[in-house]
Amino acid sequence: MRNICETDGSVEALGYWTLSDFMEESSVFGRVFHGGFGLFTYNGIPKSGWQALLLLRMLGEEKISVGDGWLAARNSRGMQVILSHYCHYDNLYCLQYKKLTDPDKAYSVFETDETRKYEIYVQGLSDGMYEIRRLTISPRHGSSFDAWLEMGQPEYLRSEEIAYLKHVSQPRLQIETREIHGSHTVECMLAPHEVQMIVISKL
C-alpha cells in the first residue's frame, strides 16, 4: 500500500512477484507460512497482501489526491479513500537480516509505533442519504497468517482447516448509513500494519 501511494503518478504500471508460494524453487515447504513471497500460500490460502490488492480494485478511476499513507479517488458511484499505517523494519533487522524461524516473532522485527489517526473531510456532496462502508485489514482481520497463529500454527493443514482460514481471513466490513448535507468528516484510527478502505456512496 505504501509503495503504491508513493509511486502514484511516477510509474505506468506495478507488478507483484509472485502470485503464489508454489512458484518457489523448492517443493518442500514445511510450514504453510514459511516466509514465502507469494500473495497466496502454496495450498491456495490468500494472504493479507492479496486482500489489500482487492481493496485497491475498489478505487475509482479518477484520482482526487494522494498523501502520506493515503490515496483518494472517485467514480460515478461515490468516493473512495484508502489508508495505511506502514511500519518499517528496525535497524538491527535491516543490518543483520536473517530469515525468521519463529512465527511468533514475526512482528518483533518492525519498529514499534503508536496508533495513527486520520480525519477525512469531504465537501461538495449533494444533500441526501449516504452509505459509508469501512473495510479493515489488520492482524485481527484479513490476515490468514495471524489466524493461523491463533489456530496453533499447525505444520500441515487438512482441507477443512484450509477452508476455515480462507473464510476467517476476510477484511472486516462495517456499514453506516447517514444523512449528509454538503460535507462530512470520517475519523479513522489505524493500528500498526493496518489498512482501511472508506467508501462513501450516495443512496
Image: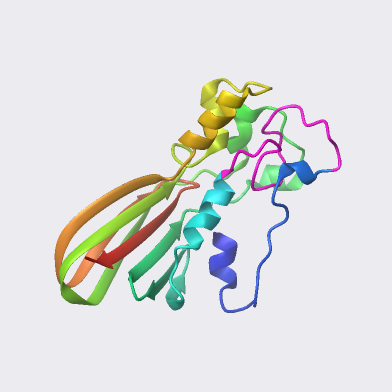
| Residue 34 seen in this snapshot | yes
Segment colored magenta: 25-47
**Which residue lies at the image location 57% right of the left edge and 50% below the top edge?**
50
Q: Is residue 90 left or right of residue 114?
A: right
Task: In the rendered view, tell whether residue 176 sits above or below residue 120.
Answer: above
Residue 31 x, y percent position in the rendering: 71, 27
Residue 83 x, y percent position in the rendering: 43, 59
**Which residue lies at the image location 57% right of the left edge and 35% below the top edge?**
145
Is 42 inside the magenta-drawn segment? yes
Q: Is residue 8 left or right of residue 30?
A: left
Task: In the rendered view, tell whether residue 161 sits above or below residue 146.
Answer: above
**Which residue lies at the image location 79% right of the left edge and 46% below the top edge?**
23
Q: What is the quadrant of the N terminus in the image?
A: bottom right
Q: Is residue 53 left or right of residue 196?
A: right
**Which residue lies at the image location 27% right of the left edge and 58% below the top edge?**
132
Task: In the rendered view, tell whether residue 12 sits above or below residue 47.
Answer: below
Is 79 inside the magenta-drawn segment? no
